Amino acid sequence: MTLEHRPMTRETIRVGVLGASGYTGADLVRLGARHPAVEITVMTANAHAGKPMGAVFPHLAELDLPRLVRVEDADWDGVDAVFCGLPHGTTQDIIATLPGSVRVIDMSADFRLRDIATYAQWYGHEHRAPELQKEAVYGLTEHYRTEIAGARLVACPGCYPTAALLLLIPLVEHGLIEADDIIIDAKSGVSGAGRSPKESTLFCEAGEGLSPYSVARHRHAPEIEQELSRAAGRDLVINFTPHLVPMSRGELLTVYVRLPGGRTAADLRRALEERYAAEPFVRVVPEGVVPATQHVRGSNHCLIGVFEDRVPGRAILVSTLDNLVKGSSGQALQNMNVMFGLDETTGLEQLPMFP
């Protein structure tokens, strides 16, 4: 598949959504339906084929949308961009069948790991589209904007990596923290586990409690390590533990770092403020303010806090975002804007919902 690598600008972008019946797919539809340049023309959901979107998600019933179809029945003729919200392992085969003129924004994990051997190790099967992997661009918008603009295939980061990397890449790049001593304590709402029924996400299992999961084996760890290693110029291993919180959406990371000799938390704050001063969706909160998930809910924002630890030579960092928006569908739409030469904030101007 080939495509001239240059940003495109057109009045209407005809969009398809693979996996529209999942949480990320539904949030992409919610946001895309109000995007002034987007026309959603194809939506797939094999288990709900033939149904209107409102029958699956009643909150979207008022939208003028095509009916859901099976993937094999989708007509990609005239489609400019496809958003993929399918489970990992299924996107690779489908993308390979799309016309070469279609740009792909993948919200699954299928193209995030640049090394296919690492992918096989963590996802339990061989990568089925290695040639496509070679052209995939990692879709962390604030750090790969130029590459995204000319890409045919963009692999949007996972929600945890987005929150972690926005916080840590500038600090690792400038040697402001000891990159071999990073501890990430991560917490996410239940929607991060997807919509398919699982025992661990039943109300009686997840409600009124807090639990770690995938301890020392979560698949977002190698993704975080991949990008931080790139920033450091050497291989890094990080300590990452996710937790399930009984809320529908939202994500917060508390990160513990060690400072090199002479560095202070103020140096970290200054570097992050300078790096993101011109970014519309990433903000370092004022000193003393503690970021919280309810400060970003429903928005494409990421908030960052920097605190001096009472332990000498250490700092505590906080990053929070909505896992379904900035952690997935919102970032995907942001990447589409970059790919098609639109203002990056188009369709993403909504403020957080509070309370």
Image (tube, helix red, strand yellow):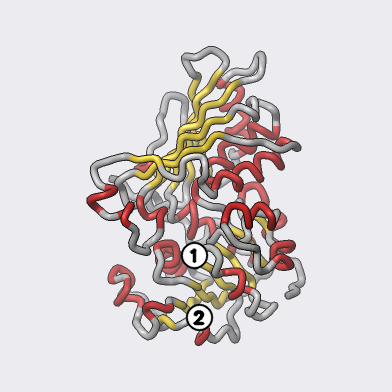
Residue at image position (54%, 69%) is 90
* Mark 2 vs mark 1, CA separation in Å: 13 Å
- The one nearer the camera, 50 or 67, is 50
Relative height, residue 300 to residue 134 (above, below):
above
Asked which quadrant contains residue 174, the reply is top right
Q: Which residue is mark 2?
A: 71
Q: Are marks 2 and 1 in contact (CB under 8 Å)?
A: no
Residue 280's spot in the image, x, y percent?
54, 47
Residue 59's spot in the image, x, y percent?
29, 68
Number of numbered discs visible in the structure rendering: 2
**Labelled disc at residue 87:** 1
Residue at image position (73%, 63%) is 135
149 on left or right of 165: right
Q: At label 2, which amino acid type do we have?
A: Val
Relative height, residue 81 to residue 147 (above, below):
below
Q: Residues within 10 Å of mark 2 (few under 14, many from 20)?
A: some
Relative height, residue 81 to residue 169 (above, below):
below
Residue 34 seen anywhere in this rendered image of the structure: no
- The one nearer the camera, 117 or 302, is 117
**Labelled disc at residue 162:** none
Asked which quadrant contains residue 194, the reply is bottom left
119 on left or right of 187: right
197 on left or right of 16: left
Relative height, residue 265 to residue 12 (above, below):
above
Tag 2's secondary structure?
helix
Q: At label 1, which amino acid type do we have?
A: Pro
Quadrant position of the C terminus in the picture: top left
Residue at image position (59%, 18%) is 264
Residue 237's spot in the image, x, y percent?
63, 36
Q: Residues within 10 Å of mark 1 (few under 14, many from 20)?
A: some
- The one nearer the camera, 195 or 352, is 195
